[in-house]
Amino acid sequence: MSKLPDGLQYSSSHEWVQDNGDGTVTVGITDHAQALLGDLVFVELPEVGKQLSTGSECGVVESVKAASDIFSPLAGEVVAVNQDLSRAPEVINQTPYGDGWIFRLRLADPAEMGTLMDAAAYQAMVDAEQG
Amino acid sequence: MPFVPHTPDDLTAMLRRIGVGSIEALFDEIPAELLAAPLEGVPPALSEMEIGRLMAQRGRQDGQPLCFLGAGAYEHHIPAAVWQLASRGELYSAYTPYQAEASQGTLQLLYEFQSMMTALMAMEVSNASLYDGASALAEAVLMAVRANRGRAHRVLLPRTLHPAYRRVVRSITEPQGIGLVELPYDPRGGHIDPESLDDLSGGDFAALVVPQPNFFGVLEEADALTDWAHRQGMLVIAAVNPIAMAVLVPPGEWGSGGADIACGEGQPLGIPLSSGGPYFGFLCCKAALVRQLPGRLVGRTLDRDGNPGFTLTLQAREQHIRRSKATSNICTNQGLMVTAATIHLALLGSEGLARVAAACHGNTRRLSERLCTIPGVEPLFDRPVLHEQALRLPAPIPEVLRSLAAHNILGGYDLGLEYPELAGAVLVCATEMRTEEDLASYHDKLARIIATRTQPKCPVQPKI
């Protein structure tokens, strides 16, 4: 698995979270998650304006062999979604941490960021899952 | 090859390998109270001779009446080639194959079926069929509610829709938290009056179901209904007779935006009445809704060497992949019925299908005109129909139908059975199968039955 980028936080359901510094965060799925899913063919995005609670299902990523829910790693309101993914879901496979972002969330409680894992903790979790 | 290929030795070997004592032990997490009782009512196996005799007896129970009954299933001419071809070994299977891509012929046939249905409905996508028209409509309702992502959980279901369809939709969707609101019909026209819908504006509904023609045979104002529903942000589900679509505007062209989902009963396309089944349902939709579409879907693609081939596609919607999040627990199709329907459609072509629809319409009109010459018989509704007509009779319908049955005539459907306010009305149908003599025969028998029932009592009492 490629090295995890610095400066991101991670959830146990394989989403990454970037703090934008203005009360909003950007969310995507990790390189590990996209590698498990395989070639993505469809992304169902959350709706802008929707209030999400922590751990709620807010979208779907579908590959040629599986479909998996996207969970919101934090609570908040969806303020933007990556519409480019509707036309080109493979961007998640190519650049999961960059152009492959999925949605932005205005946090209900910024302190909730502390519940997420840093790169080292997430790496350890993935290693443990892979046994 | 037997359907279950494992021998007892295979089972024992597999159980020993995983360290489990019995097959039942694999299911021990299911609470005992949920387990169904053993199937005590299943009789012992019969020999081929015995089963042949039993089936012949069952077949004779239906008799061969002169059929003027429609109400959801229709007696149409089926060219002899349809079932001759469908019964060939290469095609004769009820199933979509599990190792699907190894059966290119079956997949191509399903792909042709899908292409024909999308052409007939003017929709972009069709699945490979469902069990019947009623369950196809239930799936369409579930699709519409999923598609609007939980904003509205109610659907408008007109009373002009087939009563059995309404019951099936209720059985399947209400336990999933979907509210079904019935729409009344216009008592003069027997249709949904688009102006009556204004009270429901802004009513938070996911979809409106539009039958065409409706259960009374009457044509709905599909364009006005579609445009009204779209203005309210609802989806439009068309529940249509496939034969009718050869001569009426197809769902994809209703109003300014077209219906979003089209479904219905496929039986009129080459499937015999067979005492009520098996039939098949069809389900089509706009491309934007394809990920909400349940069931098998065949696509055309290119293999590694660039040769065209057929494959099951978008399987991530289905339960063998998505498990509990699948669009539906339907993971199959009515393979054999669809095989027959595809051959039937190919033999008739669009022109043949339109001629069948026109002949049905003409026969039903002629029947209605003949019957309405009998004093007291009149049309129940004043709007145009396709191939069924509701008639009011001057005698109790159950007794009239019994008397007609004694003359080997299946006289129609007693509307009072499902619509108490329409007691005294019968729904009649004359498909292309009925000849002028058939129509005359029905007229003569009905005239005599009504005459005996309505004859005034003789004013002179016999003296004893």
Image (cartoon, coloured by chain):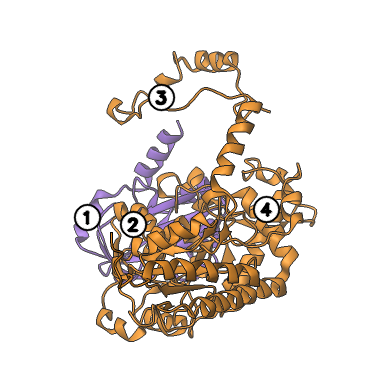
Q: Nearer the viewer, mark 4 or mark 3?
A: 3
Chain ID for orange:
B
Taking B440 as reference, is A42 above or below it? above
Helix, strand or loop under label 4: helix
As drawn, is B374 to the left or to the right of B430?
left
Both marks 2 and 4 on one chain: yes
Helix, strand or loop under label 2: helix
Chain letter of the residue beneath label 3 in the structure image = B
Disc 4 versus disc 3: distance between alpha carbons?
35 Å
Q: Position of residue B20 (x, y in %)?
A: 44, 16
Do we see residue B247 in this rendering? yes
Chain letter of the residue beneath label 4 in the structure image = B
Q: Quadrant of residue B228?
A: bottom left
Q: Nearer the viewer, mark 3 or mark 1?
A: 3
Residue bearing the label numbered 3 = B40
Number of numbered discs visible in the structure rendering: 4
Residue lying at the far front in this picture: please name it: B464
Q: Amino acid at mark 1?
A: Glu
Q: Earlier in the sequence, mark 4 or mark 3?
A: 3
